[in-house]
Image (spheres, grey):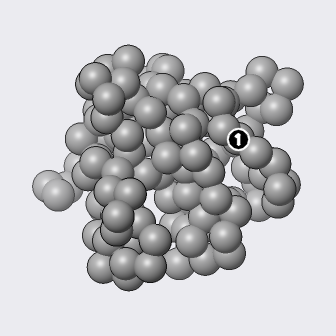
Amino acid sequence: MSDMWGYPQTAGHRAGNDLTGYKVEATDGAIGKVDKCSDEVGSAYLVVDIGIWIFGKHVLLPAGTVKSIDVSARKVYVSRTKEEIKDAPEFDKEKHLGDAHYHQSLGAYYQTPRNMPR
């Protein structure tokens, strides 16, 4: 599950690149924008504001869901559908730092194959 919390080498991410404000593109279209990001080794993630779909909802996407980053277009492409992201557990700003169970449950959510019940 640790692979889920690191940017894939093929994504084009460079440590120190601030992705805040980048648009997030799911496999089936735009889903929101990056509100916060982390490069922390073994715990890298994006907090995505999907308020355009659900008022005021933020979700935490493990860095392992990032397929590619287009710096010139300021877009992050992720390997999940809009529905998967909308159905993800809501970002919990109290638990995301230092709560191993929270990270495990999020990692499990994103690693579960789409055709299996969650």
Classify residue 40 by image quadrant: bottom right
In the image, what residue occupies the spot 48% across and 20% down?
29
Classify residue 57 by image quadrant: top left
Task: Classify 10 Å Cα crowding around label 1: few (below 14), some (14-19), many (20 and above).
Answer: many
16 sits to left or right of 100: right
Percent of width and height locating residue 13 = 78, 51
For this orientation, the residue located farthest to the left is: 117
| 110 or 54: nearer the viewer | 54
In the image, what residue occupies the spot 64% across and 59% down?
38
In the image, what residue occupies the spot 49% across and 46% down?
47
Q: Is residue 112 above or below residue 49?
A: below
In the image, what residue occupies the spot 70% across and 63% down?
39
Q: Quadrant of the C terminus?
A: bottom left
Percent of width and height locating residue 5 = 55, 68
Q: Is residue 45 above or below residue 22?
A: below
112 sits to left or right of 40: left
Percent of width and height locating residue 21 = 65, 30
Percent of width and height locating residue 107 = 39, 67
Is any part of residue 43 visible from this angle? yes
Callout 1 secondary element: loop
Classify residue 69 by image quadrant: top right
| 97 or 11: nearer the viewer | 97
Q: Is residue 62 above or below residue 84?
A: below
In the picture of the structure, the residue carrying the numbered disc 1 is 19
| 110 or 117: nearer the viewer | 110
Q: Amino acid at mark 1?
A: Leu
For this orientation, the residue located farthest to the front is: 94
Q: How many marks?
A: 1
Is any part of residue 79 visible from this angle? no
